Image: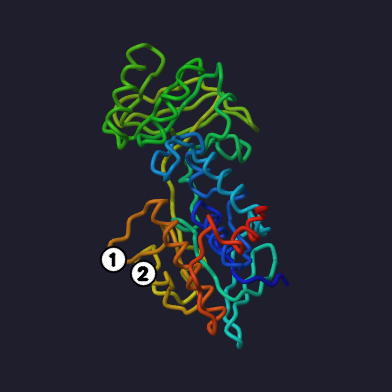
Amino acid sequence: MISTDVVIVGAGPCGIFQVFELGLLGLKAEVIDTIRDAGGQCAELYPDKPIYDIPAVPVCTGEELTQLLLQQIEPFGCGMHLGEEVTVVRRQEDGSFFVETSAGKQFNAKAVVIAAGVGSFQPRPLRAKGIEALAEDAINYRVRNPAQFAGKRLAILGGGDSALDWVIELADIAEHITLVHRRDEYRAMQVSIDKMRELEAAGKVSTIEKAKVTEVSGSGQQISSIVVQPKEGEAVTVDVEALLVFFGLSPKLGPVAEWGLDINRKTINVDTEKFETSEPGIYAVGDINFYPGKKKLILCGFHEAALAAFAIKQRIEPDKKVHVQYTTTSPIMHERLGIDD
Protein backbone atom coordinates (compact mmCIF):
# COMPACT_ATOMS: atom_id res chain seq x y z
CA MET A 1 0.00 0.00 0.00
CA ILE A 2 1.37 3.40 -1.03
CA SER A 3 0.31 6.27 1.23
CA THR A 4 0.26 9.74 -0.26
CA ASP A 5 -1.54 13.06 0.00
CA VAL A 6 -3.06 13.00 -3.49
CA VAL A 7 -3.56 10.47 -6.28
CA ILE A 8 -3.71 12.14 -9.71
CA VAL A 9 -5.46 10.20 -12.46
CA GLY A 10 -3.87 11.31 -15.73
CA ALA A 11 -0.29 12.16 -16.72
CA GLY A 12 -1.04 14.81 -19.32
CA PRO A 13 0.15 18.43 -19.01
CA CYS A 14 -2.52 19.34 -16.46
CA GLY A 15 -1.89 16.23 -14.37
CA ILE A 16 1.86 16.86 -14.33
CA PHE A 17 1.39 20.54 -13.47
CA GLN A 18 -0.96 19.50 -10.68
CA VAL A 19 2.02 17.71 -9.11
CA PHE A 20 3.95 21.00 -9.18
CA GLU A 21 1.20 23.08 -7.60
CA LEU A 22 0.68 20.49 -4.86
CA GLY A 23 4.43 20.24 -4.30
CA LEU A 24 4.72 23.99 -3.72
CA LEU A 25 2.20 23.56 -0.91
CA GLY A 26 4.15 20.67 0.61
CA LEU A 27 1.83 17.92 -0.63
CA LYS A 28 3.01 14.63 -2.15
CA ALA A 29 1.36 13.06 -5.19
CA GLU A 30 1.27 9.80 -7.13
CA VAL A 31 0.25 9.87 -10.81
CA ILE A 32 -1.52 7.02 -12.63
CA ASP A 33 -2.21 6.84 -16.37
CA THR A 34 -3.27 4.14 -18.81
CA ILE A 35 -0.82 5.48 -21.42
CA ARG A 36 2.72 4.12 -21.09
CA ASP A 37 4.43 7.51 -21.45
CA ALA A 38 3.81 10.77 -19.63
CA GLY A 39 2.31 13.62 -21.64
CA GLY A 40 -1.23 12.42 -22.32
CA GLN A 41 -2.81 13.44 -25.62
CA CYS A 42 -0.15 16.11 -26.05
CA ALA A 43 2.65 13.56 -26.38
CA GLU A 44 0.51 10.71 -27.68
CA LEU A 45 -1.20 12.42 -30.60
CA TYR A 46 1.02 15.33 -31.66
CA PRO A 47 4.49 14.98 -30.10
CA ASP A 48 6.08 16.84 -33.03
CA LYS A 49 3.37 19.44 -33.73
CA PRO A 50 4.04 23.00 -32.53
CA ILE A 51 2.09 24.56 -29.66
CA TYR A 52 2.03 28.37 -29.57
CA ASP A 53 -0.18 29.28 -26.59
CA ILE A 54 1.89 28.31 -23.54
CA PRO A 55 2.75 31.48 -21.56
CA ALA A 56 6.39 32.64 -21.99
CA VAL A 57 7.11 29.74 -24.38
CA PRO A 58 6.67 31.15 -27.91
CA VAL A 59 6.66 27.67 -29.47
CA CYS A 60 7.24 24.10 -28.35
CA THR A 61 6.17 20.62 -29.40
CA GLY A 62 3.95 18.38 -27.32
CA GLU A 63 6.97 16.27 -26.43
CA GLU A 64 9.04 19.33 -25.46
CA LEU A 65 6.24 20.65 -23.25
CA THR A 66 5.99 17.28 -21.54
CA GLN A 67 9.73 17.16 -20.85
CA LEU A 68 9.74 20.72 -19.47
CA LEU A 69 6.87 19.89 -17.13
CA LEU A 70 8.56 16.69 -15.96
CA GLN A 71 11.74 18.67 -15.28
CA GLN A 72 9.72 21.19 -13.29
CA ILE A 73 8.32 18.54 -10.91
CA GLU A 74 11.64 16.75 -10.27
CA PRO A 75 12.11 18.36 -6.80
CA PHE A 76 8.91 16.75 -5.54
CA GLY A 77 9.73 13.06 -6.05
CA CYS A 78 6.38 12.18 -7.58
CA GLY A 79 5.60 8.52 -8.27
CA MET A 80 4.62 7.75 -11.88
CA HIS A 81 2.56 4.61 -12.50
CA LEU A 82 2.12 4.41 -16.28
CA GLY A 83 0.37 1.76 -18.35
CA GLU A 84 -2.09 1.16 -15.50
CA GLU A 85 -5.79 1.96 -15.24
CA VAL A 86 -7.48 3.05 -12.03
CA THR A 87 -10.10 0.38 -11.38
CA VAL A 88 -11.23 1.20 -7.82
CA VAL A 89 -11.79 4.50 -6.00
CA ARG A 90 -13.48 3.98 -2.65
CA ARG A 91 -14.01 6.36 0.23
CA GLN A 92 -12.85 4.99 3.58
CA GLU A 93 -14.32 5.58 7.03
CA ASP A 94 -11.83 8.33 7.86
CA GLY A 95 -12.68 10.23 4.67
CA SER A 96 -9.52 9.21 2.78
CA PHE A 97 -9.61 7.22 -0.44
CA PHE A 98 -8.58 3.67 -1.32
CA VAL A 99 -7.37 3.54 -4.92
CA GLU A 100 -6.39 0.41 -6.85
CA THR A 101 -5.03 -0.04 -10.39
CA SER A 102 -5.31 -2.77 -13.00
CA ALA A 103 -1.78 -3.85 -12.02
CA GLY A 104 -2.90 -4.48 -8.46
CA LYS A 105 -1.18 -1.45 -6.93
CA GLN A 106 -3.01 0.03 -3.97
CA PHE A 107 -2.92 3.58 -2.66
CA ASN A 108 -4.23 5.41 0.37
CA ALA A 109 -4.81 9.10 -0.47
CA LYS A 110 -6.37 12.08 1.27
CA ALA A 111 -7.70 13.44 -2.05
CA VAL A 112 -8.02 12.42 -5.70
CA VAL A 113 -7.59 14.65 -8.76
CA ILE A 114 -8.95 13.49 -12.12
CA ALA A 115 -6.87 14.99 -14.94
CA ALA A 116 -7.74 12.39 -17.53
CA GLY A 117 -8.23 14.62 -20.58
CA VAL A 118 -10.99 13.14 -22.71
CA GLY A 119 -10.86 10.03 -20.56
CA SER A 120 -9.47 6.71 -21.61
CA PHE A 121 -9.08 7.03 -25.36
CA GLN A 122 -8.00 4.73 -28.15
CA PRO A 123 -7.51 5.43 -31.86
CA ARG A 124 -10.41 4.18 -33.94
CA PRO A 125 -9.01 1.05 -35.60
CA LEU A 126 -8.96 0.03 -39.23
CA ARG A 127 -11.23 -2.92 -39.87
CA ALA A 128 -10.25 -4.83 -43.00
CA LYS A 129 -9.60 -8.34 -44.20
CA GLY A 130 -6.08 -9.65 -43.54
CA ILE A 131 -5.33 -7.57 -40.44
CA GLU A 132 -5.30 -10.69 -38.28
CA ALA A 133 -2.08 -11.82 -40.04
CA LEU A 134 -0.25 -8.65 -38.98
CA ALA A 135 1.58 -7.92 -35.75
CA GLU A 136 -0.24 -5.68 -33.29
CA ASP A 137 1.94 -2.66 -34.07
CA ALA A 138 2.28 -3.22 -37.83
CA ILE A 139 -0.36 -0.54 -38.47
CA ASN A 140 0.65 2.92 -37.26
CA TYR A 141 -2.01 4.89 -35.39
CA ARG A 142 0.57 7.47 -34.27
CA VAL A 143 4.00 8.63 -35.42
CA ARG A 144 6.86 8.65 -32.94
CA ASN A 145 9.79 8.44 -35.35
CA PRO A 146 9.14 9.97 -38.78
CA ALA A 147 12.55 8.79 -40.00
CA GLN A 148 11.32 5.18 -40.05
CA PHE A 149 9.24 6.02 -43.13
CA ALA A 150 12.13 7.44 -45.18
CA GLY A 151 12.25 6.04 -48.71
CA LYS A 152 9.09 3.98 -48.27
CA ARG A 153 5.79 3.79 -50.12
CA LEU A 154 3.16 4.88 -47.61
CA ALA A 155 -0.60 4.78 -47.39
CA ILE A 156 -2.22 7.31 -45.06
CA LEU A 157 -5.88 6.85 -44.20
CA GLY A 158 -8.09 9.71 -43.00
CA GLY A 159 -9.20 13.22 -43.88
CA GLY A 160 -8.65 15.27 -40.73
CA ASP A 161 -5.81 17.43 -39.46
CA SER A 162 -3.66 14.51 -38.28
CA ALA A 163 -3.85 12.69 -41.61
CA LEU A 164 -3.00 15.76 -43.70
CA ASP A 165 -0.34 16.97 -41.27
CA TRP A 166 1.54 13.71 -41.71
CA VAL A 167 1.03 13.69 -45.48
CA ILE A 168 2.73 17.09 -45.57
CA GLU A 169 5.40 16.14 -43.00
CA LEU A 170 6.39 12.86 -44.66
CA ALA A 171 6.08 13.85 -48.32
CA ASP A 172 9.72 14.97 -48.52
CA ILE A 173 11.16 11.75 -47.09
CA ALA A 174 8.79 9.04 -48.34
CA GLU A 175 9.14 7.53 -51.79
CA HIS A 176 5.43 8.11 -52.40
CA ILE A 177 2.26 8.61 -50.35
CA THR A 178 -1.24 7.38 -51.18
CA LEU A 179 -3.93 9.23 -49.23
CA VAL A 180 -7.20 7.34 -48.87
CA HIS A 181 -10.26 9.23 -47.59
CA ARG A 182 -13.85 8.10 -47.22
CA ARG A 183 -15.15 11.43 -48.53
CA ASP A 184 -14.07 14.10 -51.00
CA GLU A 185 -14.32 16.85 -48.36
CA TYR A 186 -11.67 17.19 -45.68
CA ARG A 187 -11.96 18.14 -42.01
CA ALA A 188 -8.48 19.68 -41.95
CA MET A 189 -7.47 23.35 -42.09
CA GLN A 190 -7.68 24.85 -45.57
CA VAL A 191 -3.96 25.65 -45.63
CA SER A 192 -3.24 21.94 -45.12
CA ILE A 193 -5.67 20.93 -47.85
CA ASP A 194 -4.05 23.41 -50.24
CA LYS A 195 -0.57 22.09 -49.44
CA MET A 196 -1.73 18.50 -49.97
CA ARG A 197 -3.12 19.48 -53.38
CA GLU A 198 0.25 21.04 -54.26
CA LEU A 199 2.01 17.80 -53.35
CA GLU A 200 -0.55 15.89 -55.41
CA ALA A 201 0.10 18.12 -58.42
CA ALA A 202 3.86 17.57 -57.96
CA GLY A 203 3.38 13.78 -58.09
CA LYS A 204 4.50 13.17 -54.50
CA VAL A 205 1.02 12.25 -53.29
CA SER A 206 -1.83 10.29 -54.86
CA THR A 207 -5.35 10.63 -53.47
CA ILE A 208 -8.17 8.10 -53.58
CA GLU A 209 -11.36 9.74 -52.35
CA LYS A 210 -14.81 8.39 -51.55
CA ALA A 211 -13.12 5.07 -50.83
CA LYS A 212 -12.09 2.74 -48.02
CA VAL A 213 -9.46 0.06 -47.48
CA THR A 214 -11.10 -3.37 -47.47
CA GLU A 215 -8.04 -5.64 -47.36
CA VAL A 216 -4.45 -5.54 -46.14
CA SER A 217 -1.79 -7.98 -47.34
CA GLY A 218 1.34 -8.85 -45.38
CA SER A 219 2.46 -10.75 -42.32
CA GLY A 220 4.08 -9.89 -39.03
CA GLN A 221 5.51 -6.38 -39.16
CA GLN A 222 5.60 -6.20 -42.96
CA ILE A 223 2.77 -4.78 -45.06
CA SER A 224 2.96 -5.38 -48.83
CA SER A 225 -0.27 -3.95 -50.26
CA ILE A 226 -3.77 -2.68 -49.58
CA VAL A 227 -7.01 -3.06 -51.51
CA VAL A 228 -8.96 0.18 -51.83
CA GLN A 229 -12.63 0.04 -52.77
CA PRO A 230 -14.05 3.30 -54.18
CA LYS A 231 -17.73 4.05 -53.63
CA GLU A 232 -18.13 3.66 -57.37
CA GLY A 233 -16.02 1.53 -59.69
CA GLU A 234 -13.55 -1.32 -59.32
CA ALA A 235 -11.30 -2.01 -56.36
CA VAL A 236 -7.66 -0.90 -56.66
CA THR A 237 -4.61 -2.68 -55.26
CA VAL A 238 -1.85 -0.34 -54.05
CA ASP A 239 1.65 -1.54 -53.18
CA VAL A 240 2.70 -0.01 -49.85
CA GLU A 241 5.34 -0.70 -47.23
CA ALA A 242 3.72 1.11 -44.32
CA LEU A 243 0.20 2.02 -43.31
CA LEU A 244 -0.76 5.03 -41.16
CA VAL A 245 -4.35 5.31 -39.92
CA PHE A 246 -5.89 8.52 -38.54
CA PHE A 247 -9.59 7.92 -38.03
CA GLY A 248 -9.72 9.96 -34.83
CA LEU A 249 -10.19 8.87 -31.24
CA SER A 250 -12.89 7.00 -29.42
CA PRO A 251 -12.99 8.73 -26.02
CA LYS A 252 -14.48 6.89 -23.06
CA LEU A 253 -14.68 7.87 -19.44
CA GLY A 254 -14.06 4.22 -18.55
CA PRO A 255 -14.22 3.39 -14.82
CA VAL A 256 -14.51 7.12 -13.98
CA ALA A 257 -18.15 6.92 -15.08
CA GLU A 258 -18.81 4.45 -12.25
CA TRP A 259 -17.42 6.57 -9.40
CA GLY A 260 -20.74 8.22 -8.56
CA LEU A 261 -19.74 11.65 -9.89
CA ASP A 262 -22.07 14.21 -11.49
CA ILE A 263 -21.39 13.45 -15.16
CA ASN A 264 -22.22 15.91 -17.94
CA ARG A 265 -22.16 13.79 -21.09
CA LYS A 266 -18.49 12.76 -21.18
CA THR A 267 -17.25 15.40 -18.75
CA ILE A 268 -17.44 15.89 -14.99
CA ASN A 269 -19.23 18.86 -13.43
CA VAL A 270 -17.11 20.90 -10.99
CA ASP A 271 -17.37 24.16 -9.10
CA THR A 272 -15.13 27.07 -10.07
CA GLU A 273 -13.83 27.82 -6.58
CA LYS A 274 -12.17 24.50 -5.78
CA PHE A 275 -12.70 22.48 -8.98
CA GLU A 276 -14.22 19.86 -6.74
CA THR A 277 -16.65 17.31 -8.14
CA SER A 278 -19.95 16.29 -6.57
CA GLU A 279 -17.93 13.94 -4.35
CA PRO A 280 -16.03 15.87 -1.64
CA GLY A 281 -12.30 15.24 -1.87
CA ILE A 282 -12.40 14.31 -5.57
CA TYR A 283 -11.38 17.10 -7.94
CA ALA A 284 -11.21 17.36 -11.75
CA VAL A 285 -8.98 19.60 -13.86
CA GLY A 286 -8.32 19.97 -17.57
CA ASP A 287 -10.42 18.78 -20.49
CA ILE A 288 -12.37 16.23 -18.45
CA ASN A 289 -14.18 18.82 -16.32
CA PHE A 290 -17.09 21.11 -17.11
CA TYR A 291 -18.40 24.40 -15.71
CA PRO A 292 -20.10 27.44 -17.28
CA GLY A 293 -17.65 29.16 -19.59
CA LYS A 294 -15.28 26.17 -19.75
CA LYS A 295 -12.58 26.41 -22.42
CA LYS A 296 -10.54 23.33 -23.32
CA LEU A 297 -7.10 24.94 -23.29
CA ILE A 298 -3.93 23.76 -21.56
CA LEU A 299 -3.60 27.26 -20.08
CA CYS A 300 -7.03 26.97 -18.44
CA GLY A 301 -6.15 23.56 -17.05
CA PHE A 302 -3.04 25.01 -15.42
CA HIS A 303 -5.20 27.65 -13.70
CA GLU A 304 -7.61 24.96 -12.49
CA ALA A 305 -4.73 22.88 -11.11
CA ALA A 306 -3.48 25.84 -9.06
CA LEU A 307 -6.86 26.51 -7.44
CA ALA A 308 -7.49 22.80 -6.86
CA ALA A 309 -4.14 22.52 -5.06
CA PHE A 310 -5.08 25.29 -2.59
CA ALA A 311 -8.47 23.67 -1.99
CA ILE A 312 -6.84 20.28 -1.33
CA LYS A 313 -4.35 21.84 1.07
CA GLN A 314 -7.22 23.43 2.99
CA ARG A 315 -9.12 20.13 3.04
CA ILE A 316 -6.13 18.21 4.40
CA GLU A 317 -5.26 20.89 6.97
CA PRO A 318 -8.62 22.51 7.79
CA ASP A 319 -7.37 24.21 10.96
CA LYS A 320 -4.60 26.13 9.18
CA LYS A 321 -4.98 29.13 6.92
CA VAL A 322 -3.40 28.53 3.52
CA HIS A 323 -1.31 31.56 2.65
CA VAL A 324 -0.24 32.47 -0.87
CA GLN A 325 3.54 32.51 -1.03
CA TYR A 326 5.63 33.54 -4.01
CA THR A 327 8.36 31.40 -5.51
CA THR A 328 10.39 34.57 -6.13
CA THR A 329 10.90 35.42 -2.46
CA SER A 330 9.55 32.66 -0.18
CA PRO A 331 12.25 30.67 1.69
CA ILE A 332 9.72 27.83 2.15
CA MET A 333 9.10 27.69 -1.61
CA HIS A 334 12.84 27.73 -2.26
CA GLU A 335 13.38 24.87 0.16
CA ARG A 336 10.65 22.79 -1.48
CA LEU A 337 12.09 23.52 -4.92
CA GLY A 338 15.63 22.66 -3.76
CA ILE A 339 16.93 26.17 -4.46
CA ASP A 340 19.97 27.37 -2.48
CA ASP A 341 19.45 30.96 -1.31
Amino acid residing under circle 1:
Pro
Q: Residue at x 47, y 68 (%)?
A: 308
Query: On the image, numbered disc 2 is attached to which residue?
Result: 272
Q: Residue 75 or 61: which is nearer the viewer? A: 75
Tell me the element at label 1.
Answer: loop
Q: Quadrant of the N terminus?
A: bottom right
- Badge 2, how many Cα within 10 Å: few under 14, some, many 20+? some
The image position of residue 59, as x and y in percent, is 44, 36
The image position of residue 271, as x and y in percent, is 37, 72
Residue lying furthest top in this view?
A: 202
Amino acid residing under circle 2:
Thr
The image position of residue 280, as x and y in percent, is 47, 79
Query: On the image, numbered disc 1 is attached to which residue?
Result: 292
Q: Residue at x 68, y 58 (%)?
A: 77
| Res. 205 image quadrant | top left
- Left or right: where does residue 235 sit relative to residue 112? left
Query: Where is 340 relative to 156, above or below?
Result: below
Answer with mark 1 or mark 2, whichever residue precedes in sequence. 2
Asked if disc 1 and disc 2 are in contact, CB closer than 8 Å, the reply is yes
Q: Residue 314 or 120: which is nearer the viewer? A: 314
Colour mapping: rainbow
Disc 1/disc 2 C-alpha distance (Å): 9 Å
Numbered disc in front, either 1 or 2: 2
